[in-house]
Structure formats: C-alpha cells, structure tokens
Image: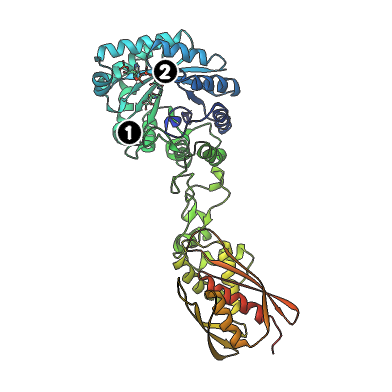
C-alpha cells in the first residue's frame, strides 16, 4: 500500500519574505485559491503578528479558502500566538505553527538562552497554542545544525505537550541529503511518542540541496513537506513544490508515496506566482522553467521527435504544459528543421530541406534563436534562387559624414551586370544602382522595414510596393542586413513584372 505525503505550501509566508515579493490581500487570496485548486493540504498564510496587513491577509484567506488547513506562523511568544489564533478564527481548519531555535548558534547567540530553557519555552508555547486550536505544529528552527540527541529531546517534549506536527527545518540549507535523512530516521527511531505526530521537512536551498534533502527526509519517514511554488523563499529559497511532487510521481515505483496535488495545475500556478510576485522563473528551473521541456540540440531533437521519452522523463502535459518545444538554434539538425517546416505547412523534398538547412545554419550562426517567421523567410529565400533576376553581390559604404555609395552586381538570366551609385542613404544608393542596371521606369510607392523579433541580431523584413506602367507590384525581402533585405524586396517585385 502506498503512503500519503502532506504538502504544506509556504509560498505566502516564507516565499513572501523575499524582498520585492510582498503581495496585497487581494493577490494573496488569488494565490491561496490557486493553491487550493492545486490540491495542497496546508496553506501557510502568513505571520499575523508581523503587520496589520499580514494579519488581515490570514483572516481573508481563512474566509476564502474551503478545505485546506490554514496555518499561521508565530514565535514561541504568547502574544504572537494570541494574534495568530485571532487571525485564524474564520478558518474551517486552522493550525498554529509555533517554534523556537534549537541549534547552538540560535540558543546562545540569538536567544541568549540555554538548552533546557529552550525546551521549557517550546513546551509552554505548544501548550499555549493548544488552548486555541487542536492542530499545533512546532518548528525547531535550525534543526539542520542541531545535534540529533538534543533535537530528539525537544521533539519528544513538544509531542508530549500536544504538537500534532513537528517541523525539522534545515533553516540555513546546511545539511547534505544523507545527513538530513539520517536526522529524520534518528528522530523516528529514538523519539518516544513519535507516532503521535507527523514529522515535517522544511529545507532551504543555500547549497542547492533543498529538494534532495526533502526527498531524503521523506524516504526516512517524514510525511509532510514544506515547499513553495517555484522554490521561492528566504535567501536561496525553499524546496520547490513542483520538484518534490514530480519526483514522487515520476519515481513512484521506487518511493510509493502519493500526494493530493493535481499536477496539471502546476505550470499555471507557477506563472501566477511569478507574475504576481514579480519574480521571474529561471529558464532552466526544473519542471516549470521555460527550457524544462525545450530541446535545442540536433541529437536531442531527433531523439525526441522519434520518441519523446528518449530525452524526457516527464510528459509536459502532466504539469500543464501543452507540448515539448523544439527550439531551432545553430545546434539543430535537419530532423528539427523538417519538423518545424511540417508544422508550418511545408512539405519539402529531401533536397529542398537540405538547401533550406544550409541557409538556416548561416542565419542561426548570426541569430541566437530562429523563429517561425525566420523559417518561412528561409523557404522563400531558397525559392528566390529560381528567379530570373538575382542579387549576386552588394557592397555598401556608408556612415556619418560620408556619401553613401553602393555597388551592385545582378545576375540576369545567367549574365552578370555591375553598377555603382551614390544616394541620400545606403538603401537609396543600392536601389539606384539596381535601377541603372535594369533601365526600367519603376517608382517606389511604399517601403516598410520591420524587425521581426527584438534583438539587434534580428532579421529585418522589408515590404515594397513598386509602380511599373501604372501597375502595382509587391516585393518582400528578409535578411539580417537591412540593405540586402531592401534590394531583395525590390528585385522580388521586379521579378514579378513582365520580361522586357
Ligand atoms: C526562519 C524564519 O523564516 S522565521 C520567520 C521569519 N519571518 C519574519 O521574521 C517576518 C516577521 N517578523 C516580524 O515582523 C518581526 O520580526 C516580529 C514582529 C516577529 C518581531 O519584531 P520585533 O519585536 O521588533 O523583534 P525583532 O524582529 O527585532 O527581533 C526578533 C526577536 O524575537 C526573538 N525571537 C526570534 N525567534 C524567536 C522564536 N522563535 N521564539 C521566541 N523568540 C524569538 C529574537 O531573539 C528577538 O528577540 P530580542 O529582541 O529579545 O533579542
Ligand atoms: C519558521 C521556520 C519553519 C522557517 O521558516 C525556517 O526554519 O526556515
């Protein structure tokens, strides 16, 4: 039979401690409702004594949320507990989360106390909170750096005092997975009455091991994990909800542990939190980062297109992402390009794909990522080769305090023609040189240049409208060099005119 892990979300408390991530009450309610929809068991809604705004948020979240337990944080201080209890009065299921530091540092340098006095304060706080609510969670702050024998004494005492959940935080993110796992196992094996409480993990990510430590704690008997969306939280952050949940889901056969999380809501909740808190998700963040299901190198893309599971351990739809993405870069191969062409509606022969691929590599070496627009332009560009009048060569001299000059060589039905011209700008000089060769009376009626995306490495798109003998001809060109794009657009229109 499988075991159940309770998910305790502290995005609205530990996550919200991050500078710049503070939310107002309305925003907090929106996040709380999303967390409820996601299926978390406990929402830590705030630290009510800390400010009137946080107090109000805990009150309003308690009213707005239907079934998850609403938790409020306190110190081992009676006034904190009174205020938390007051804030939780509308919660259908309320929990007070109280606690105190237990490491040598915290006892001596933060609390100016001693180990026995800390146990007394811990017990007093739990008993005091029990006057208000049945569900009392105790945290042994900095448990990660607390000696196991002493920690076991603290845990035993608070469970005896009535704690229903005991949180073993690695507050400073100091432990390694084997140490954290051993700590949890030590408590499970040595604390009398441990079966009367749930042991919880609350790991910070200072050494990048928050998720590994949490999983190690779970393997060793913890049955509640304290997590945040996107792993946000004090300093380097907390354990991320999505990483823990998807580890349990992906490695179910080994771990045999369930959660109540509706994983299909993970991505949208991640984006909601990121947007409301102005906290971008790093692109390579596991599960929810922009690149978590994006494949950019040719060998991987080919593998994914043959069978997604060659390079993906999670089906992106399981976390609410529509599909894996194949990102075209200079490291992509023909399989990826062909796939993109097909998505865009092009069925090209192998030879044609090879031709487009060569152009694609030239462009991809200049431009960081290739978008659909670029691919369309590349196909158009290879078709351009079949035209009667082609641009063979273009050289432009331009700059501040210089007269712009352009030299153009055109290939007209296999014969080469050169011309040089000045102009009031480099485009004007180039078009004048082209006109010298063509000797046609064409008028440029409209000229539009656009950058397709955003970077200075972008492809410039040029649209032109020419008038020849009272008839309009439209031309289109695209290139990372806008003067080349302009000449190509001009020639595109000219190629559509009747042959002289
Ligand atoms: C590890 C964590 O993430 S814990 C949660 C951290 N979150 C926050 O701190 C946000 C909310 N905090 C606050 O709003 C304020 O710090 C308050 C309201 C709690 C206290 O404010 P102040 O009374 O001005 O105290 P201040 O913040 O300067 O110092 C904290 C005091 O609490 C004591 N303290 C710290 N933790 C605990 C605890 N768990 N139990 C009892 N006392 C504690 C400190 O020793 C210090 O006491 P001292 O002034 O006698 O030395
Ligand atoms: C208050 C506790 C649970 C905490 O946030 C920590 O120790 O990191």
Asked whether mark 2 and ligand 1 are closer than 8 Å, the reply comes as: yes
Q: Residue at x 40, y 10 (%)?
A: 78
Q: Residue at x 36, y 33 (%)?
A: 204
> Is residue 426 positioned above or below 34 on the image?
below
- Which corner quadrant holds the C terminus? bottom right
User: Which label lies toward us, 1 or 2?
Assistant: 2
- Residue 487 percent coordinates (x, y): 57, 77
Q: Earlier in the sequence, mark 1 or mark 2?
A: 2
The residue wearing badge 1 is 173
Q: For the residue labelled by badge 1, is the local secondary structure a helix, a strand or a loop?
A: loop
> Is residue 381 positioned above or below 193 on the image?
below
Q: Is residue 349 visible?
A: no
Looking at the picture, tell me which residue is in the foreground, 80 or 477: 477
The residue wearing badge 2 is 74
Looking at the picture, tell me which residue is in the foreground, 433 or 486: 433
- Mark 2 crowdedness (10 Å alpha carbons): few <14, some 14-19, many ≥20: many
- Residue 483 percent coordinates (x, y): 53, 73
Q: Residue at x 49, y 47 (%)?
A: 314
């Amino acid at each position: 039979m499988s075991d159940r892990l309770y998910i305790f979300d502290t995005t609205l408390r530990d996550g919200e401690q991050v500078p710049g991530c503070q939310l107002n009450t309305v925003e907090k309610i929106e996040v709380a409702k999303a967390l409820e929809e996601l299926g978390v068991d406990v929402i830590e809604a705030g630290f009510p004594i800390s400010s009137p705004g946080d107090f109000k948020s805990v009150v309003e979240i308690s009213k707005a949320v239907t079934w998850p337990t609403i938790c409020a944080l306190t110190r081992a201080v009676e006034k904190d507990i009174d205020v938390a209890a007051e804030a939780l009065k509308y919660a259908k299921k309320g929990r007070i989360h109280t606690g105190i530091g237990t490491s040598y540092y915290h006892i001596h340098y933060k609390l100016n106390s001693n180990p026995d006095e800390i146990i007394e304060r811990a017990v007093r706080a739990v008993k005091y909170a029990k006057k208000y609510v049945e569900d009392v969670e105790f945290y042994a702050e900095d448990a990660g750096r607390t000696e196991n024998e002493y920690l076991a004494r603290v845990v035993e005492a608070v469970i005896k005092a009535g704690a229903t959940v005991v949180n073993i935080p690695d507050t400073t993110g100091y432990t390694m997975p084997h140490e954290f796992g051993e700590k949890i196992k030590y408590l499970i094996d040595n604390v009398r009455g441990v079966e009367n409480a749930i042991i919880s993990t609350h790991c910070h990510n200072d050494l990048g091991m928050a998720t590994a430590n949490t999983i190690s704690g779970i393997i060793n008997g913890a049955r509640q994990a304290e997590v945040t969306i996107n792993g946000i939280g004090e300093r380097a952050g907390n354990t991320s909800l999505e990483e823990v949940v998807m580890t349990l889901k992906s490695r179910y056969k080994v771990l045999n542990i369930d959660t109540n999380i509706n994983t299909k809501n993970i991505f949208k909740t991640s984006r909601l939190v990121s947007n409301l808190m102005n906290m971008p998700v790093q692109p390579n963040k596991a599960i929810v980062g922009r690149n978590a299901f994006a494949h950019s190198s040719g060998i991987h893309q080919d593998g994914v297109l043959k069978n997604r599971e060659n390079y993906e351990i999670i089906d992106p739809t399981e976390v609410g992402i529509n599909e894996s993405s194949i990102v075209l870069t200079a490291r992509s191969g023909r399989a990826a390009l062909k796939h993109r062409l097909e998505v865009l509606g092009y069925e090209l022969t192998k030879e044609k794909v090879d031709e487009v691929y060569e152009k694609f590599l030239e462009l991809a070496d200049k431009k960081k990522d290739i978008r659909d627009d670029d691919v369309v332009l590349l196909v158009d560009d290879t078709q351009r080769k079949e035209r009667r009048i082609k641009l063979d060569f273009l050289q432009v001299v331009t700059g501040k305090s210089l007269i712009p000059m352009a030299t153009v060589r055109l290939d007209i039905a296999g014969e080469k023609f050169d011309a040089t011209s000045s102009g009031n700008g480099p485009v004007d000089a180039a078009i004048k040189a082209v006109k010298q060769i063509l000797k046609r009376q064409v008028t440029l009626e409209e000229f539009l240049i656009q950058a397709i995306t955003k970077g200075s490495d972008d492809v410039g798109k040029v649209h032109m409208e020419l008038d020849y003998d009272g008839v309009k001809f439209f031309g289109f060109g695209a290139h990372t060099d806008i003067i080349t794009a302009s000449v190509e657009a001009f020639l595109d229109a000219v190629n559509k005119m009747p042959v002289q």
